[in-house]
Image: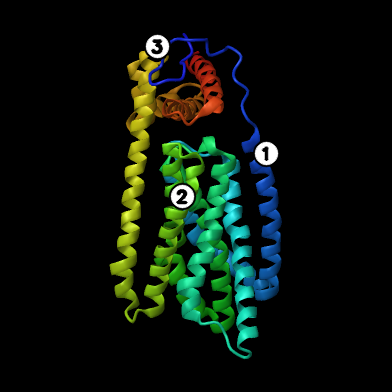
Protein backbone atom coordinates (compact mmCIF):
# COMPACT_ATOMS: atom_id res chain seq x y z
CA UNK A 1 0.00 0.00 0.00
CA UNK A 2 1.14 3.55 -0.60
CA UNK A 3 0.73 6.79 1.29
CA UNK A 4 -2.00 9.19 0.16
CA UNK A 5 -0.43 12.50 -0.78
CA UNK A 6 -2.07 15.86 -0.09
CA UNK A 7 -4.16 17.27 -2.92
CA UNK A 8 -7.61 17.24 -4.44
CA UNK A 9 -7.52 13.44 -4.78
CA UNK A 10 -5.34 10.75 -3.20
CA UNK A 11 -2.35 9.61 -5.28
CA UNK A 12 0.30 6.95 -4.53
CA UNK A 13 3.38 8.45 -2.87
CA UNK A 14 5.67 7.60 0.06
CA UNK A 15 4.64 4.64 2.26
CA UNK A 16 2.66 5.43 5.40
CA UNK A 17 5.37 3.98 7.63
CA UNK A 18 7.99 6.42 6.32
CA UNK A 19 9.28 8.97 8.82
CA UNK A 20 6.35 11.30 9.39
CA UNK A 21 6.40 15.07 9.51
CA UNK A 22 6.99 16.08 13.09
CA UNK A 23 3.70 16.96 14.75
CA UNK A 24 3.32 20.13 16.75
CA UNK A 25 2.93 19.72 20.49
CA UNK A 26 1.37 23.12 21.09
CA UNK A 27 -2.11 21.70 21.53
CA UNK A 28 -1.03 19.43 24.41
CA UNK A 29 0.91 22.21 26.11
CA UNK A 30 -2.06 24.54 25.69
CA UNK A 31 -4.42 21.97 27.21
CA UNK A 32 -2.17 21.35 30.22
CA UNK A 33 -1.55 25.04 30.93
CA UNK A 34 -5.20 25.89 30.32
CA UNK A 35 -6.46 23.14 32.63
CA UNK A 36 -4.06 24.19 35.40
CA UNK A 37 -5.10 27.85 35.14
CA UNK A 38 -8.76 26.87 34.87
CA UNK A 39 -8.41 24.69 37.95
CA UNK A 40 -6.89 27.58 39.89
CA UNK A 41 -9.78 29.83 38.83
CA UNK A 42 -12.21 27.07 39.89
CA UNK A 43 -10.69 27.05 43.37
CA UNK A 44 -11.23 30.81 43.59
CA UNK A 45 -14.86 30.42 42.51
CA UNK A 46 -15.46 27.63 45.04
CA UNK A 47 -13.97 29.75 47.83
CA UNK A 48 -16.12 32.73 46.80
CA UNK A 49 -19.29 30.60 46.70
CA UNK A 50 -18.53 28.98 50.04
CA UNK A 51 -18.22 32.42 51.63
CA UNK A 52 -21.25 33.91 49.85
CA UNK A 53 -23.63 30.95 50.20
CA UNK A 54 -22.24 28.89 53.06
CA UNK A 55 -20.79 25.41 52.78
CA UNK A 56 -24.05 23.48 53.22
CA UNK A 57 -25.96 25.65 50.73
CA UNK A 58 -23.08 25.32 48.27
CA UNK A 59 -23.28 21.53 48.47
CA UNK A 60 -27.05 21.51 47.94
CA UNK A 61 -26.83 23.93 45.03
CA UNK A 62 -24.01 21.94 43.45
CA UNK A 63 -25.89 18.64 43.67
CA UNK A 64 -28.98 20.17 42.08
CA UNK A 65 -26.89 21.87 39.38
CA UNK A 66 -25.49 18.48 38.40
CA UNK A 67 -28.93 17.43 37.12
CA UNK A 68 -29.22 19.88 34.18
CA UNK A 69 -25.46 19.60 33.62
CA UNK A 70 -25.79 15.85 33.07
CA UNK A 71 -28.48 16.39 30.43
CA UNK A 72 -26.43 19.02 28.62
CA UNK A 73 -23.26 16.90 28.64
CA UNK A 74 -25.16 13.91 27.25
CA UNK A 75 -26.42 16.09 24.41
CA UNK A 76 -22.89 17.35 23.74
CA UNK A 77 -21.62 13.77 23.72
CA UNK A 78 -24.23 12.87 21.11
CA UNK A 79 -23.20 15.78 18.87
CA UNK A 80 -19.50 14.98 19.37
CA UNK A 81 -19.84 11.21 19.06
CA UNK A 82 -19.13 10.86 15.35
CA UNK A 83 -15.71 12.55 15.42
CA UNK A 84 -14.80 13.12 19.09
CA UNK A 85 -12.72 16.09 20.19
CA UNK A 86 -9.66 15.55 22.43
CA UNK A 87 -10.44 15.25 26.13
CA UNK A 88 -7.85 17.84 27.14
CA UNK A 89 -9.39 20.53 24.95
CA UNK A 90 -12.87 19.68 26.24
CA UNK A 91 -11.71 19.87 29.86
CA UNK A 92 -10.16 23.26 29.17
CA UNK A 93 -13.41 24.43 27.58
CA UNK A 94 -15.48 23.26 30.56
CA UNK A 95 -13.17 24.85 33.14
CA UNK A 96 -13.06 28.07 31.16
CA UNK A 97 -16.84 28.27 31.29
CA UNK A 98 -17.28 27.08 34.88
CA UNK A 99 -14.51 29.20 36.38
CA UNK A 100 -12.73 31.77 34.21
CA UNK A 101 -15.90 33.11 32.57
CA UNK A 102 -17.61 33.27 35.94
CA UNK A 103 -14.69 35.19 37.46
CA UNK A 104 -14.87 37.69 34.59
CA UNK A 105 -18.64 38.12 35.03
CA UNK A 106 -18.34 38.56 38.81
CA UNK A 107 -15.50 41.09 38.53
CA UNK A 108 -17.37 43.15 35.93
CA UNK A 109 -20.55 43.04 38.02
CA UNK A 110 -18.63 44.23 41.07
CA UNK A 111 -17.10 47.03 39.00
CA UNK A 112 -20.53 48.12 37.76
CA UNK A 113 -21.91 48.15 41.29
CA UNK A 114 -18.98 50.22 42.56
CA UNK A 115 -19.34 52.66 39.66
CA UNK A 116 -23.06 53.09 40.30
CA UNK A 117 -22.44 53.59 44.01
CA UNK A 118 -19.81 56.23 43.24
CA UNK A 119 -22.01 58.10 40.75
CA UNK A 120 -25.23 57.73 42.71
CA UNK A 121 -24.58 57.05 46.42
CA UNK A 122 -27.34 54.95 47.91
CA UNK A 123 -28.62 53.90 44.47
CA UNK A 124 -28.37 50.55 42.75
CA UNK A 125 -27.90 49.20 39.27
CA UNK A 126 -31.04 48.72 37.20
CA UNK A 127 -31.82 44.98 37.27
CA UNK A 128 -33.56 44.99 33.88
CA UNK A 129 -30.59 46.71 32.23
CA UNK A 130 -28.27 44.25 33.91
CA UNK A 131 -30.26 41.28 32.62
CA UNK A 132 -30.82 42.52 29.07
CA UNK A 133 -27.58 44.44 28.42
CA UNK A 134 -24.81 43.74 30.92
CA UNK A 135 -25.26 39.99 31.31
CA UNK A 136 -25.51 39.15 27.59
CA UNK A 137 -22.50 41.28 26.64
CA UNK A 138 -20.17 40.32 29.49
CA UNK A 139 -21.08 36.65 29.67
CA UNK A 140 -21.00 35.99 25.92
CA UNK A 141 -17.69 37.80 25.49
CA UNK A 142 -16.18 35.82 28.38
CA UNK A 143 -17.48 32.47 27.07
CA UNK A 144 -16.70 33.21 23.45
CA UNK A 145 -13.06 34.01 24.25
CA UNK A 146 -12.68 30.48 25.56
CA UNK A 147 -13.80 29.01 22.24
CA UNK A 148 -11.53 31.42 20.36
CA UNK A 149 -8.56 30.30 22.48
CA UNK A 150 -9.18 26.67 21.59
CA UNK A 151 -9.18 27.65 17.93
CA UNK A 152 -6.01 29.74 18.32
CA UNK A 153 -3.94 27.09 20.08
CA UNK A 154 -5.44 23.88 18.65
CA UNK A 155 -6.56 25.05 15.24
CA UNK A 156 -6.12 21.65 13.63
CA UNK A 157 -8.83 20.32 15.97
CA UNK A 158 -11.37 22.63 14.29
CA UNK A 159 -12.71 20.80 11.25
CA UNK A 160 -15.86 22.88 10.94
CA UNK A 161 -19.10 24.07 12.57
CA UNK A 162 -19.71 20.86 14.55
CA UNK A 163 -16.42 21.26 16.39
CA UNK A 164 -17.20 24.90 17.11
CA UNK A 165 -20.61 23.86 18.41
CA UNK A 166 -19.09 21.20 20.68
CA UNK A 167 -16.51 23.53 22.23
CA UNK A 168 -19.00 26.37 22.62
CA UNK A 169 -21.57 24.06 24.21
CA UNK A 170 -18.95 22.71 26.61
CA UNK A 171 -17.90 26.22 27.68
CA UNK A 172 -21.56 27.17 28.11
CA UNK A 173 -22.31 24.00 30.08
CA UNK A 174 -19.58 24.91 32.56
CA UNK A 175 -20.83 28.47 32.91
CA UNK A 176 -24.44 27.38 33.38
CA UNK A 177 -23.36 24.84 36.02
CA UNK A 178 -21.73 27.50 38.19
CA UNK A 179 -24.49 30.02 37.54
CA UNK A 180 -27.10 27.46 38.56
CA UNK A 181 -25.26 26.87 41.84
CA UNK A 182 -25.49 30.60 42.54
CA UNK A 183 -29.17 30.82 41.62
CA UNK A 184 -30.15 27.67 43.50
CA UNK A 185 -28.18 28.69 46.58
CA UNK A 186 -29.58 32.23 46.57
CA UNK A 187 -33.14 30.92 46.16
CA UNK A 188 -32.71 28.58 49.11
CA UNK A 189 -31.33 31.35 51.33
CA UNK A 190 -33.93 33.94 50.33
CA UNK A 191 -37.09 31.85 49.99
CA UNK A 192 -36.46 28.39 51.36
CA UNK A 193 -37.39 25.10 49.73
CA UNK A 194 -40.39 26.51 47.85
CA UNK A 195 -38.33 29.19 46.11
CA UNK A 196 -35.58 26.67 45.41
CA UNK A 197 -38.06 24.29 43.79
CA UNK A 198 -39.48 27.01 41.53
CA UNK A 199 -35.99 28.14 40.50
CA UNK A 200 -34.96 24.56 39.74
CA UNK A 201 -38.01 24.04 37.52
CA UNK A 202 -37.28 27.23 35.55
CA UNK A 203 -33.53 26.76 35.16
CA UNK A 204 -33.03 23.03 35.50
CA UNK A 205 -36.04 21.70 33.57
CA UNK A 206 -37.41 24.44 31.29
CA UNK A 207 -34.14 26.05 30.15
CA UNK A 208 -31.05 23.90 30.83
CA UNK A 209 -29.78 24.54 27.29
CA UNK A 210 -30.17 28.33 27.31
CA UNK A 211 -26.48 29.20 27.60
CA UNK A 212 -25.60 26.48 25.11
CA UNK A 213 -27.92 28.08 22.54
CA UNK A 214 -26.38 31.51 23.04
CA UNK A 215 -22.71 30.57 22.88
CA UNK A 216 -23.37 28.10 20.05
CA UNK A 217 -23.69 31.13 17.76
CA UNK A 218 -20.07 32.07 18.49
CA UNK A 219 -18.84 28.50 18.17
CA UNK A 220 -20.60 27.94 14.86
CA UNK A 221 -19.14 31.15 13.44
CA UNK A 222 -15.60 30.13 14.44
CA UNK A 223 -16.23 26.67 12.99
CA UNK A 224 -17.33 28.18 9.68
CA UNK A 225 -14.16 30.28 9.65
CA UNK A 226 -12.09 27.14 10.28
CA UNK A 227 -13.82 25.30 7.43
CA UNK A 228 -13.12 28.23 5.08
CA UNK A 229 -9.48 28.52 6.19
CA UNK A 230 -10.11 32.09 7.27
CA UNK A 231 -6.80 32.52 9.14
CA UNK A 232 -6.74 36.01 10.65
CA UNK A 233 -10.23 36.53 9.24
CA UNK A 234 -11.53 34.34 12.06
CA UNK A 235 -11.76 37.50 14.19
CA UNK A 236 -14.44 38.87 11.89
CA UNK A 237 -16.37 35.61 12.07
CA UNK A 238 -15.91 35.57 15.84
CA UNK A 239 -17.36 39.06 16.20
CA UNK A 240 -20.28 38.16 13.93
CA UNK A 241 -21.07 35.07 15.97
CA UNK A 242 -20.60 37.02 19.20
CA UNK A 243 -23.13 39.65 18.11
CA UNK A 244 -25.63 36.89 17.35
CA UNK A 245 -24.98 35.27 20.74
CA UNK A 246 -25.45 38.58 22.57
CA UNK A 247 -28.65 39.34 20.66
CA UNK A 248 -30.11 35.89 21.36
CA UNK A 249 -29.13 36.12 25.03
CA UNK A 250 -30.70 39.57 25.30
CA UNK A 251 -33.89 38.36 23.59
CA UNK A 252 -34.12 35.41 25.96
CA UNK A 253 -33.53 37.51 29.10
CA UNK A 254 -35.76 40.28 27.83
CA UNK A 255 -38.67 37.89 27.29
CA UNK A 256 -38.34 36.87 30.94
CA UNK A 257 -37.76 40.39 32.30
CA UNK A 258 -40.50 42.26 30.42
CA UNK A 259 -43.01 39.58 29.46
CA UNK A 260 -46.29 39.22 31.35
CA UNK A 261 -47.02 35.69 30.15
CA UNK A 262 -43.95 33.63 30.99
CA UNK A 263 -45.43 30.35 29.77
CA UNK A 264 -46.64 31.88 26.50
CA UNK A 265 -43.26 33.48 25.83
CA UNK A 266 -41.53 30.22 26.63
CA UNK A 267 -43.67 28.34 24.10
CA UNK A 268 -43.57 30.99 21.37
CA UNK A 269 -40.00 32.28 21.71
CA UNK A 270 -37.76 29.89 23.58
CA UNK A 271 -39.10 26.53 22.42
CA UNK A 272 -38.85 27.43 18.70
CA UNK A 273 -35.27 28.63 19.21
CA UNK A 274 -34.40 25.36 20.91
CA UNK A 275 -36.13 23.32 18.21
CA UNK A 276 -34.22 25.18 15.52
CA UNK A 277 -30.94 24.49 17.31
CA UNK A 278 -31.72 20.77 17.55
CA UNK A 279 -32.55 20.63 13.83
CA UNK A 280 -29.28 22.42 13.00
CA UNK A 281 -27.29 19.97 15.13
CA UNK A 282 -28.91 17.02 13.34
CA UNK A 283 -28.12 18.48 9.93
CA UNK A 284 -24.52 19.17 10.90
CA UNK A 285 -24.13 15.62 12.18
CA UNK A 286 -25.39 14.30 8.84
CA UNK A 287 -22.86 16.46 7.02
CA UNK A 288 -20.10 14.89 9.14
CA UNK A 289 -21.29 11.43 8.09
CA UNK A 290 -21.24 12.44 4.42
CA UNK A 291 -17.75 13.92 4.74
CA UNK A 292 -16.45 10.76 6.39
CA UNK A 293 -17.87 8.52 3.70
CA UNK A 294 -16.64 10.72 0.85
CA UNK A 295 -13.08 11.01 2.16
CA UNK A 296 -12.74 7.34 3.10
CA UNK A 297 -14.03 6.57 -0.37
CA UNK A 298 -10.97 8.38 -1.72
CA UNK A 299 -8.71 6.13 0.33
CA UNK A 300 -10.67 3.13 -0.94
CA UNK A 301 -9.97 4.26 -4.51
CA UNK A 302 -6.24 4.26 -3.65
CA UNK A 303 -6.46 0.75 -2.20
CA UNK A 304 -6.48 1.43 1.52
CA UNK A 305 -10.03 0.16 2.12
CA UNK A 306 -12.53 -2.00 0.31
CA UNK A 307 -15.94 -0.46 -0.50
CA UNK A 308 -17.48 -2.77 2.11
CA UNK A 309 -15.09 -1.46 4.76
CA UNK A 310 -16.05 2.12 3.91
CA UNK A 311 -19.69 1.20 4.49
CA UNK A 312 -18.78 -0.36 7.85
CA UNK A 313 -16.64 2.55 9.02
CA UNK A 314 -18.48 5.55 7.57
CA UNK A 315 -22.19 4.90 8.16
CA UNK A 316 -24.15 4.59 11.43
CA UNK A 317 -25.65 1.25 10.38
CA UNK A 318 -22.26 -0.05 9.29
CA UNK A 319 -20.68 0.91 12.60
CA UNK A 320 -23.40 -0.90 14.51
CA UNK A 321 -22.80 -3.98 12.35
CA UNK A 322 -19.04 -3.78 12.87
CA UNK A 323 -19.39 -3.46 16.65
CA UNK A 324 -21.88 -6.34 16.74
CA UNK A 325 -19.33 -8.52 14.89
CA UNK A 326 -16.59 -7.47 17.32
CA UNK A 327 -18.74 -8.31 20.35
CA UNK A 328 -19.52 -11.76 18.91
CA UNK A 329 -15.83 -12.73 18.69
CA UNK A 330 -14.14 -14.78 21.38
CA UNK A 331 -12.59 -12.99 23.08
CA UNK A 332 -14.61 -9.87 22.22
CA UNK A 333 -12.77 -7.30 20.12
CA UNK A 334 -15.02 -4.33 20.79
CA UNK A 335 -12.26 -2.03 22.04
CA UNK A 336 -10.15 -2.69 18.96
CA UNK A 337 -13.08 -2.06 16.63
CA UNK A 338 -13.88 1.21 18.39
CA UNK A 339 -10.26 2.33 17.94
CA UNK A 340 -10.40 1.44 14.25
CA UNK A 341 -13.66 3.38 13.77
CA UNK A 342 -12.30 6.38 15.66
CA UNK A 343 -9.01 6.43 13.76
CA UNK A 344 -10.76 6.01 10.41
CA UNK A 345 -12.99 8.98 11.23
CA UNK A 346 -10.04 11.12 12.27
CA UNK A 347 -8.31 10.06 9.05
CA UNK A 348 -11.29 11.24 7.00
CA UNK A 349 -11.21 14.66 8.65
CA UNK A 350 -7.43 14.93 8.36
CA UNK A 351 -7.95 14.29 4.65
CA UNK A 352 -10.68 16.93 4.60
CA UNK A 353 -8.29 19.50 6.07
CA UNK A 354 -5.54 18.58 3.60
CA UNK A 355 -7.88 18.68 0.60
CA UNK A 356 -9.25 22.04 1.76
CA UNK A 357 -5.75 23.50 2.09
CA UNK A 358 -6.14 24.39 5.77
CA UNK A 359 -4.38 21.46 7.44
CA UNK A 360 -0.69 22.17 6.99
CA UNK A 361 2.11 19.87 8.12
CA UNK A 362 0.22 18.72 11.21
CA UNK A 363 -2.58 17.18 9.17
CA UNK A 364 -0.06 15.42 6.92
CA UNK A 365 1.63 13.99 10.03
CA UNK A 366 -1.76 12.96 11.40
CA UNK A 367 -2.62 11.26 8.11
CA UNK A 368 0.60 9.24 8.09
CA UNK A 369 0.25 8.16 11.71
CA UNK A 370 -3.42 7.26 11.31
CA UNK A 371 -2.83 5.18 8.19
CA UNK A 372 -0.12 3.22 10.00
CA UNK A 373 -2.38 2.75 13.05
CA UNK A 374 -5.28 1.58 10.91
CA UNK A 375 -3.13 -1.06 9.19
CA UNK A 376 -2.06 -2.37 12.61
CA UNK A 377 -5.56 -2.26 14.11
CA UNK A 378 -7.14 -4.01 11.16
CA UNK A 379 -4.53 -6.78 11.30
CA UNK A 380 -5.11 -7.24 15.03
CA UNK A 381 -8.87 -7.53 14.53
CA UNK A 382 -8.52 -10.20 11.86
CA UNK A 383 -6.11 -12.40 13.80
In terms of secondary structure, where does tag 3 sit? loop
Label 1: which residue?
29
Label 3: which residue?
303
For residue 341, say whether it is visible.
Answer: yes
Q: CA distance from mark 1 to mark 2?
A: 27 Å
Q: CA distance from mark 1 to mark 3?
A: 36 Å
Tell me what residue is drawn at x 38 percent, y 29 percent: 292
Whether residue 358 is situated above or below residue 249 in the rendered picture: above
2 vs 3, front mark? 2
Position in image of residue 139 (x %, y %): 53, 64
Whether residue 318 is situated above or below residue 255 in the rendered picture: above
1 vs 3, front mark? 1
Label located before the other in sequence (1 or 3): 1
Label 2: which residue?
236
Whether residue 123 is situated above or below residue 363 in the rendered picture: below
In terms of secondary structure, where does tag 2 sit? helix
Amino acid sequence: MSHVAPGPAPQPAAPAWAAPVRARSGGTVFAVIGIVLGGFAALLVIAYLAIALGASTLVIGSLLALVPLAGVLLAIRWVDRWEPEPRGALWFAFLWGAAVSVVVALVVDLGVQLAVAFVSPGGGADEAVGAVVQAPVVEEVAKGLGVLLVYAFARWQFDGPVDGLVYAATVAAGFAFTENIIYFGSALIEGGAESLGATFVVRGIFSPFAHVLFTACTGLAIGIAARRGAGGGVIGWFLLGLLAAIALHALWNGSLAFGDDAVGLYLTVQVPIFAGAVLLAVLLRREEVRTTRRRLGEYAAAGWFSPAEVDLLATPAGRRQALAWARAQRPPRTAGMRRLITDATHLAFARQRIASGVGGAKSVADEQALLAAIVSERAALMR
